[in-house]
Amino acid sequence: MTAFAGDTIGSALYADGRRVFSRSFKYHRPRGLLCCAGRCPNCMMTVDGVPNVRVCVEPAREGADVRAQNVLGSLDRDFLSVVDRIGGPFTPVGFYYRTMLRPRRAWPVYERVLRNLAGLGRVPETGEPRRYDTEHRRVDVLVIGGGRSGQKAAAEAAAQGGRVLLVDERGGVTAAGYEVLAPARAIGIYEGGLVPIDAGTVLYRVRAARIVVATGTVEQPLVFPGNDLVGVMLPNAVRRLVREWSIRPGERAVVIGADEVVDDLRRAGTDVVRRERPSSLRAERGGGRLARVVVDGEAIDCDLLVVSGGRAPASSLLAQGGPQVEAVGSVLGEQPAAVPLDARTGERSFVCICEDVTDKDLKRAVAEGFDSIELAKRYTTVTMGPCQGKLCHLASVRLLARETKTTEAAIGTTTARPPWQPVELGLLAGRHHEPMKRSPLHFRHVEAGATMMWTGAWQRPFAYGDVAAEVRAVHSDLGVIDVSTLGKLLVKGPDAAELLDRLYPNRFSDLAVGRIRYGVITTDGGRIVDDGTVGRLADDCFYVTTTSTGSESVYEWFEWWNAVWRYDVEIVNVTGALAAVNLAGPRAREALAALTGDDVSNEALSYLDARELRVAGIPCLALRIGFVGELGYELHCAASAAEHLWDALVAAGAVPFGLEPQRVLRLEKAHVIVGQDTDSESNLLSAGMPWLLKLDKGDFVGRYAAELVQERGVSERLVGFTMTPGVLPDEGAQVVVDGRPGGRVTSARVSERLGRTIGLAWVGPEVAQEGAEITIRVGAADERASVTLSPFYDAAGERLRS
Amino acid sequence: MTFLLDCPHCGPRDVYEFKFQGEVTTRPDATPTQEELSAYVYFRANVAGVQREWWYHRQGCGLWFLAERDTRTNAVLSTEVP
């Protein structure tokens, strides 16, 4: 199809002879151009995969793919229009609340059918997502609407100085000392003078000290039988067709009231029959669209009926306004006079063309007791369609007033919430961001062919190849894992030890310089929120590690309590500045000694010592700890030196291992992963860490709750379990007690070295005993498991200390 | 919720830059009864009116500060460093 420059898709289609533009929401009645101003739902099509585009205002462009929607067949022959012909009596307003309830088992069938029929348009499932952006703007004055009043207000504001922005739905406003955003649509007015503006693929979040609403009026359709037929148009639509695109709107037109379009129509070559406001009016169809108008009993053949119910102020934005909002122009005007019409015979009379709500539907709703406008709205969905009440709110209020024999004022209005204009969800979502954190060693892992996985925002190696081989390397020789993702905080100042004593249930004030202690952070509700190690670097300086996901939240937590208690302590989050690797395995000391001139003997650097070392020339903080259960050193160094250190360790024979082998290794030691094995209900006693609870010191966060738990006992316990090696429960699998759920598995792996399946699970305290037999649901079967309270491997921790 | 907050360090900023930490509570200074502990941990006054609350300038300077805000209008009456 061809289009001229300046054409919209809608005008080009109309010029090409197309009259049916869509099929209606419920009855699938043919619909044609009505407002031609982007207000009504009649011209919504799918353009280049984007559903519900109003083609009457969508500029025509080369190669655009335009498709009809809500149609089975074609626009002219829609098989679903059977709903209009026979479905009427069976699908009255609210039918979905009352029908299709029985038989219950048939509901899946109904549901499938309805699912296919419901809604308008289809979200594209393929193709590139469009890119949306958000821009933040701050202006002194924002003018919404670029008509005469809006332009005048903008010019006046600009003359007084200050930044002025005018937003208009249509292009063509020329700036005069102020900025113009067009075509663009203000979606609503929010708290604090925030106005989101939809400019296609950019959402402007504009904050304005003053907001001038100059949205003018919206031409209202009239409610009469057949008022939705293809060929019934609002005066403005006719005027646009003639003036903007030189299109002849029809062969023979009946014009009621709207004298302003008569000259335009005649100039375009349309025969015009004029009538003044009648007392009865109906439109009749022939060949699927308007063929005849009956005015006060007089039948007139025509293919175009131009009529309107007057202009209603477009005041929705004013209803959302705050103290910054003022209005100018016709939006401040009166509602148009009501046009009472006798509408007893003929076609349906539509109050709401978006949702196919007729006058009968509303009357029925009132008769059923939904006589408040808010209730009638929810029951019939009048004003809830794509036009958001622009074309139907006034008519529905008037009809309700007439039916309930009250005044319009007594009926009131429905709440005008944003969005005032339709907006794409993608625009609200903004650009598709997937923030990714990469360790300083990221590209070493990629080069080594690691399978990367997401852990929170971090990309980490799952494994480099064979998980079992990586586990074996750590057990019997030497492995190295990147643990740069650990949160790392420096806590420094005269009160540092006291602050930590109050933030952790155990004690740090008596920790010797150069020593490390494990710690768990709890809330005042006693719940476990994070864990890590705390090393004392000097009397007044501690090095705190947190979980990988906890670095931000623990830092905030520390800062918050420091603000509450006002200690003389500085807390620095050095997570991104430092890298960390864990060198682990029986050969770790030998390998480390070969790379450093410092003394790393078991006496000089024993288990839970923290020392500064120079490894392969790199200054490191070495923490002798062992999450994976073997002799190990966690080496923390500047991020910029991490690759050099890593290369030296790998050259010394350390086998890189990923997260999955680490998870097997730590599970053999029954080391808990906070968030994996604990949840928001877990406390120190239920998680089996009573040794961390030091009640012989002063107050600390979580103390009172811990005392209470100690007094009352725990309702469940985290325990280890073993199973025969062929059986592996899912994480989250049920523990079954007497045929009922009695707990859940949090971690489970097959340990090659132990020749068993091992795991952690929450169980009732009565079975939290060494050797107790429990049952775990694996698939459909209940499998036996045996409870273990100590680590599965090297329970005495000899390998860590060796 | 799109109001502005006056960070004592950075000045007026969009509320989305901040983390809200709830109303200021009073931590028991001696072993509380179970009711007192529950009230402190779980219950909030939730006033319709002016309340003192904690805010954190997460996407800014990282300052924890106190604000007085009218919960009915979101008008921030004052902010201060504790």
Image (cartoon, coloured by chain):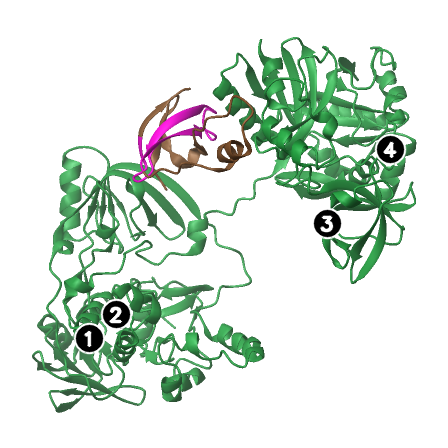
Q: Colour of chain A?
A: green
Residue located 86% across and 29% down the image:
A630
Front in this rendered view, residue A408 or A345: A408
Q: Which three-letter amino acid code belongs to the residue tagged 1?
A: Glu
Tag 2 and tag 3, C-beta contact below 8 Å: no
Residue A499 x, y percent position in the rendering: 58, 17
Q: Is residue A416 left or right of residue A685?
A: left
Front in this rendered view, residue A290 or A362: A362
Residue located 22% across and 69% down the image:
A237
Chain bearing tag 4 is: A
Q: Which three-letter amino acid code belongs to the residue tagged 4?
A: Val
Residue A228 magenta-highlighted: no
Q: Which mark is residue A371?
A: 2
Q: Earlier in the sequence, mark 3 or mark 4?
A: 4
Q: Earlier in the sequence, mark 1 or mark 4?
A: 1
Asked if residue A744 shows in the view, the reply is yes
Tag 1 and tag 2, C-beta contact below 8 Å: yes
How much space separates mark 3 and mark 4, taking CA atoms? 30 Å
Q: Is residue A421 left or right of residue A710?
A: left
Q: Earlier in the sequence, mark 1 or mark 3?
A: 1
Q: Which residues are magenta?
A: B49-76
> Which residue in the protein does label 4 denote?
A474
Circle 4: element type: helix
Q: Which mark is residue A744?
A: 3
